[in-house]
Image (tube, rainbow, N blue to C red):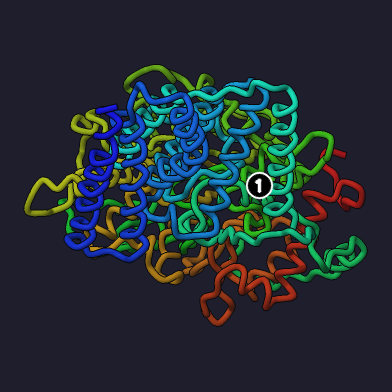
């Protein structure tokens, strides 16, 4: 009895202490009202857990304990919302419709598992750990890539596991705090178990949970439903929906992007007419003779950081790229991805399709390209039709992004992956466990020199040397170093300098490769560009400008999606500044420079590039150089909507596809 009498003063005292701490933080940390309200709410939830665990009498009456157990059963979903949201993005948990939806979702999942097994412990603990683990994965992905977890990341799971060793995760206060909260939550669940004693109640709970989950799925994923709740996904900045609506609700809402909807203006016959009538503008800069060899180098994470921000370094980074640009065609290629997404850039390059018409950060190789569809329309097939042998080279695991299955669909005769590289496990050919550009270019030169004279060869090559993870201790031994000139050992400067050192080695290898190509008698055409900017680009803008460019206005942020472009030939080209272009136009540009005939789709893209020289999943620029978001451009331009219709036919319309590869 004495214990019960002390309970209320102790509980009230604990509540006052925690709320006082929360209010003190609110007044000392200048932040918005959302953060402050969430802090106060979190303190209340923490009070509930501590009260049930340490203050509530262990010898309470059975009736009192049942009440406490039922209270915890009702509160558990809200506590999970707090644990998930603080881990993912911090202050949002009590400030949106989305978090109310998340609490209802967690409650329905708990009731479903509760009904199936008859016990509350596994239901409450499983749901909490599942969503906490997903939020942790999203937290880590956001730190590395700048974008949260999305449903189609499951397609990239095996690739992510292959490369995750190159990254060093940072343990944050949010991770530690949410983990401690999760542990405390699980202990409370263990102390206050609940059972369903009657079969009838178990059946009612099962049916009710299924009805709620089905209704939520309909409301969030089916726009035609009268119960539809519109949760904006915002593909320009994916994290926006997660900040405004919470992690769980935004993640579920993104499932509706897994399927590409048929364009409203789509008609297969109109597509046929568009392709038949397409006329390409006259292209002035053509090689003096037909190239026997065509080499495409997608250089991993190669970007011109000197064009992004001003900084001082101890030695030049890009002297060879600059020199080659003066005797070739140079420009900037605009991309749909940042910090990763190589396969998306590769997909746009080879097919001429745009990621703007697909779900944000989707994985086209695993989601859309299928042998049964014969939908591998690509540059490789077109060059193969011109008599070229086609070869793909990528010194990584062949199963990454299912390349070993997709490359034959895209028209490649052969594929050389990591273990096909000479000395692939020799430390001299690797930096940080990545096959070097220099070793890779040596293998390309061997292939070019040893093939039959006059045999036409198209090589599509993706490098690996500059892959992310720029803080490993191995960097200290890499020479020559390129370092930022700064007054102290800033950790940001160290990571940026490590990347610049790799970029300098890539530039040196490019120069050596070009000199070797000059010695070949056969006309050779080289296309070189970066597949995406590195994650350190954001660190650089924060270091040099004091603010992260990722959160700038759309036009300024778009500079994070640009890499250098070079087209060069050992037989000479008229020096030309191409300006800005997009990845899906590069195959057309390469074909035009080579002097080869264009396909009807390429003629359409050539004409489109004059109207919209830049069109990506992130940004667009019209012929006058005016910036638009891709959504704005698509709504304004009939030509872009025609592009969308053609892409839908060639990639997704299995019944009415105009071209099937192979045929």
Quarter occupied by residue 437: top left
Residue at position x 52%, y 49% from top? Answer: 526
Q: For the residue labelled by badge 1, is the local secondary structure a helix, a strand or a loop?
A: helix
According to the image, label 1 marks what residue? 255
Residues packed near mark 1 inside 10 Å, few (<14), some (14 to 19) or many (20 plus): some
**Which part of the image, by quadrant, shows the C terminus?**
top right
Residue at position x 41%, y 27% from top? Answer: 186
Q: Is residue 26 among what the camera can see? A: yes
Q: Is residue 160 among what the camera can see? A: no
Residue 416 percent across, percent down from the top left: 58, 27
Residue 478 percent across, percent down from the top left: 23, 33
Q: Nearer the viewer, residue 7 or 518?
A: 7
Q: Nearer the viewer, residue 181 or 52?
A: 52
Specify the farthest residue to the front.
1
Specify the farthest residue to the left.
487
User: How many numbered badges does the structure rendering display?
Assistant: 1
Q: Nearer the viewer, residue 204 or 558?
A: 204
Residue 462 percent across, percent down from the top left: 51, 39
Residue at position x 51%, y 31% from top? Answer: 130
119 relative to 224, above or below: above
Residue 355 percent across, percent down from the top left: 63, 55
Quarter occupied by residue 157: top right
Q: Nearer the viewer, residue 16 or 582?
A: 16
Residue at position x 53%, y 21% from top? Answer: 420
């Amino acid at each position: 009895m004495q214990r019960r009498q002390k309970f209320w003063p102790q509980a009230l005292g604990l509540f006052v202490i925690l709320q006082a701490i929360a209010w003190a933080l609110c007044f000392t940390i200048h932040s918005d009202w959302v953060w402050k309200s969430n802090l106060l709410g979190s303190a209340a939830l923490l009070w509930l857990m501590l009260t049930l665990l340490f203050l509530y009498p262990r010898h309470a009456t059975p009736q009192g304990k049942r009440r406490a157990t039922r209270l915890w059963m009702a509160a558990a979903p809200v506590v999970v919302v707090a644990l998930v949201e603080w881990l993912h993005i911090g202050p949002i948990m009590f400030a949106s419709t989305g978090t109310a939806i998340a609490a209802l979702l967690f409650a329905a999942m708990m009731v479903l598992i509760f009904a199936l097994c008859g016990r509350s412990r596994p239901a409450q603990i499983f749901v909490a750990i599942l969503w906490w683990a997903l939020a942790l994965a999203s937290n880590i992905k956001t730190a590395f890539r700048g974008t949260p977890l999305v449903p189609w990341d499951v397609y990239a799971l095996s690739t992510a596991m292959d490369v995750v060793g190159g990254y060093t995760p940072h343990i944050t206060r949010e991770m530690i705090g949410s983990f401690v909260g999760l542990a405390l939550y699980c202990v409370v669940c263990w102390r206050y178990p609940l059972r369903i004693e009657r079969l009838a109640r178990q059946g009612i709970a099962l049916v009710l949970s299924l009805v709620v989950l089905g209704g939520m799925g309909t409301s969030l994923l089916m726009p035609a439903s009268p119960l539809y709740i519109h949760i904006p996904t915002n593909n320009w900045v994916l994290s926006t929906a997660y900040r405004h609506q919470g992690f769980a609700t935004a993640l579920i809402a993104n499932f509706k992007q897994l399927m590409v909807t048929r364009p409203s203006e789509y008609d297969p016959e109109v597509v046929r007419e568009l392709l038949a009538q397409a006329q390409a503008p006259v292209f002035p800069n053509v090689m003096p003779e037909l190239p026997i060899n065509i080499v495409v180098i997608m250089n991993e994470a190669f970007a011109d950081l000197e064009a992004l921000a001003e900084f001082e370094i101890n030695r030049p980074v890009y002297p060879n790229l600059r020199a080659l640009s003066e005797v070739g065609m140079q420009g900037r290629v605009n991309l749909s991805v940042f910090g990763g997404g190589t396969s998306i850039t590769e997909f746009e390059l080879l097919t001429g399709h745009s990621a703007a018409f697909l779900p944000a950060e989707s994985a086209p190789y695993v989601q859309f390209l299928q042998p049964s569809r014969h939908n591998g329309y690509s540059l490789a097939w077109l060059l193969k039709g011109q008599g070229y042998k086609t070869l793909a080279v990528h010194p990584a695991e062949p199963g990454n992004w299912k390349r070993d299955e997709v490359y034959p669909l895209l028209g490649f005769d052969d594929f050389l992956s990591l273990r096909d590289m000479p000395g692939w496990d020799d430390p001299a050919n690797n930096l940080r466990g990545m096959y070097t550009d220099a070793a890779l270019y040596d293998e390309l030169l061997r292939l070019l020199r040893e093939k039959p004279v006059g045999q036409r060869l198209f090589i599509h090559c993706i490098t690996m040397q500059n892959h992310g993870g720029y803080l490993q201790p191995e960097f200290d031994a890499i020479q020559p170093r390129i370092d930022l000139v700064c007054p102290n050992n800033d950790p940001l400067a160290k990571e940026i300098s490590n990347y610049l050192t790799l970029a300098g080695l890539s530039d040196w290898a490019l120069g050596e490769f070009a000199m070797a190509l000059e010695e070949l008698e056969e006309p050779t055409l080289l296309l070189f560009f970066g597949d995406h900017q590195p994650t350190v680009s954001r660190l650089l803008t924060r270091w040099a400008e004091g603010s992260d460019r990722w959160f700038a206005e759309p036009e300024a942020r778009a500079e994070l999606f640009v890499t250098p472009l070079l087209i060069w030939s050992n037989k000479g080209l008229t020096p030309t500044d191409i300006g800005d272009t997009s990845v899906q136009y590069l195959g057309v540009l390469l074909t035009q420079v080579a002097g080869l005939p264009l396909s009807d789709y390429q003629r359409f893209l050539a004409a489109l590039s004059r109207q919209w020289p830049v069109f990506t999943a992130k940004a667009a620029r019209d012929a006058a150089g005016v910036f638009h978001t891709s959504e704005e451009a698509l709504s304004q331009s009939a030509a872009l909507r025609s592009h969308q219709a053609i892409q839908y036919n060639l990639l997704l319309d299995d019944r009415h596809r105009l071209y099937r590869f192979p045929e």
